[in-house]
Image (tube, rainbow, N blue to C red):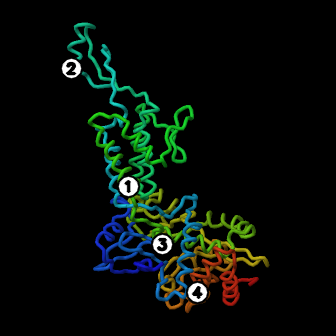
Amino acid sequence: MYQNLRFFTESECYPIFYEEDIKFMSQFGGTDTPNRLIEQRGNDWKINFVGEVKTPNATYFSFPKNVFYQDIENKDKLISDLYKILERFSKDDTGRSLIIKVDGDFSTHRYYFELLKKYFLDYVTYEFIYPSETKKIHSNYALDGEISVIDTFKNRKMYGSGATYLVKNLKNSDEWMLDDIYFYTLQNLKNKLGISEKENRDLENMFEYILSSGHKINKIEDSKIFSENGKELLDMSNETEVLKKIKDCDVDIIHLPIKNALLKYYEKVILTSSYNSVNFVFTSHFERVWENIIQQALGCNTQTSRNFKKEIETKYKNFEIEETIPPVDTTNEYINMYPPDGKHRGLTKWSELVKGRWRMCSRGRRLMPDVFVELEDKRRFIGDAKYYTDSNSSDFTKEIGDYNDAQNNLYPMVIFSIPNRENINKTTIFPSGGYRRRENSPNELIIIGVCVQDIIDDALNNTSKVLSESINIIHDHTRRENW
């Protein structure tokens, strides 16, 4: 299992020795996306993913923050469990998968995606790639199409004034399917590579333009292309048949490069052995994975806990955060600095100038904890999952302040974080400085470090080790009633 296997820890820096691997991982996602698997830091490379990347040279496996290969007691189990976690808990709020899992030579996938995208977005070839067959129509009225000077000269002798236009026949054919194959291939590559929002927006805008121009794309569903009457025309998973269809489609010289690119893609990429593969989540997305694991392990998905969240979440949504803005000379200066739409500070409304200072109010500014738990004995607590390298160094101003104020200090407020490296294999811990209380205020915060293997076990197996240990820590330190 460990032949040519290199272990990383996300957010740490390491040397990488193969130039082609550096190029692949540092350019993954294309030039427009902010995400990179690795980023250069001096002579080393900072790791920005959790999961696995395979190349012909090595397999790179990256653990979550603070989890180091040499410290792990049961490495095989944790690796196996992390694969399961990536499969089961990598969803955002809309249910969209955050995991990127693809087999294939990505450098080649990316090359052909960029090539096909360039053709697709080229307005010079806006006629897309329908058959080169045209109709010659002589008319006294302007038509959509190019004027044929020679044919106009000839036809005026026969038909009188007017011009002869080369009018494209936009009627699609069940036999000529290069347009459908082209569109499917672009969509498939887009999903494989996890392209940027800008790239996706550009493609969608062009596709809408193509449809508005009268072109039609056949229905594509489950890797199959269907005609207007529902007849299955082509199974795109049958690469041999796809290649045959591409070869059978005639095109004019303008669109020949598109046909050749599709031929080379399916010949060289699909029908040959693949080398690189990935199964990972970017750093920014693993924060959501961590939240999902914490919620599952602590019982946030039980009916009583969901009812508790439903009961109290309106307090957070309606909670107003007040901010005091430094004085400015004029009302206009204030409005320019902090407009009512709140674009600069996330604020949704503002009030009058009071003693030279503006009192600002923000309603529901991303104020929603991750964890709402009600136990069988009716005790309750609220919490937040933090995927930090060093949670002890954070001041947690929002959590100890606004999160407590919104629920009127009725329930314990708890931070669940990955412990520091020296405690990574320990069971659920209450770190030094784990209890914080505002001076002259009932606001309190309890910080709990959870063992990564324990929290994964609980999430996968529906056990409650971390919850039981957390309950004991909360009981020992909170000053809330009924605890």
Q: Nearer the viewer, residue 461 or 356?
A: 461
* Corner quadrant of residue 399: bottom right
Mark 2: secondary structure: helix
Q: Nearer the viewer, residue 380 or 450?
A: 450
Closer to the chain start, of discs 1 and 3, is: 3
Mark 1: secondary structure: helix
- Three-letter code for the amino acid on which mark 1 is drawn: Val
Closer to the chain start, of discs 2 and 1, is: 2
Nearest-to-viewer mark from 1 and 3:
1
Mark 3: secondary structure: strand
> Residue at horizontal 45%, vertical 76%?
62
- Three-letter code for the amino acid on which mark 2 is drawn: Val
The residue that disc 1 covers is 269
Closer to the chain start, of discs 4 and 2, is: 2
Nearest-to-viewer mark from 3 and 4:
3
Q: CA distance from mark 1 to mark 3?
A: 24 Å
Nearest-to-viewer mark from 2 and 1:
1
Closer to the chain start, of discs 3 and 4, is: 3
Closer to the chain start, of discs 4 and 1, is: 1
Quadrant that contains the C terminus:
bottom right
Nearest-to-viewer mark from 3 and 2:
3
Nearest-to-viewer mark from 4 and 2:
2
Q: Nearer the viewer, residue 41 or 120?
A: 120
> Residue at horizontal 52%, vertical 34%?
227
The residue that disc 3 covers is 51
Q: Residues within 10 Å of mark 4 (few under 14, many from 20)?
A: some
The residue that disc 4 covers is 436
The residue that disc 2 covers is 149
Mark 4: secondary structure: strand
- Three-letter code for the amino acid on which mark 4 is drawn: Arg
> Residue at horizontal 76%, vertical 82%?
482
Residue 102 in the image: state x and y as whole percent.
46, 61
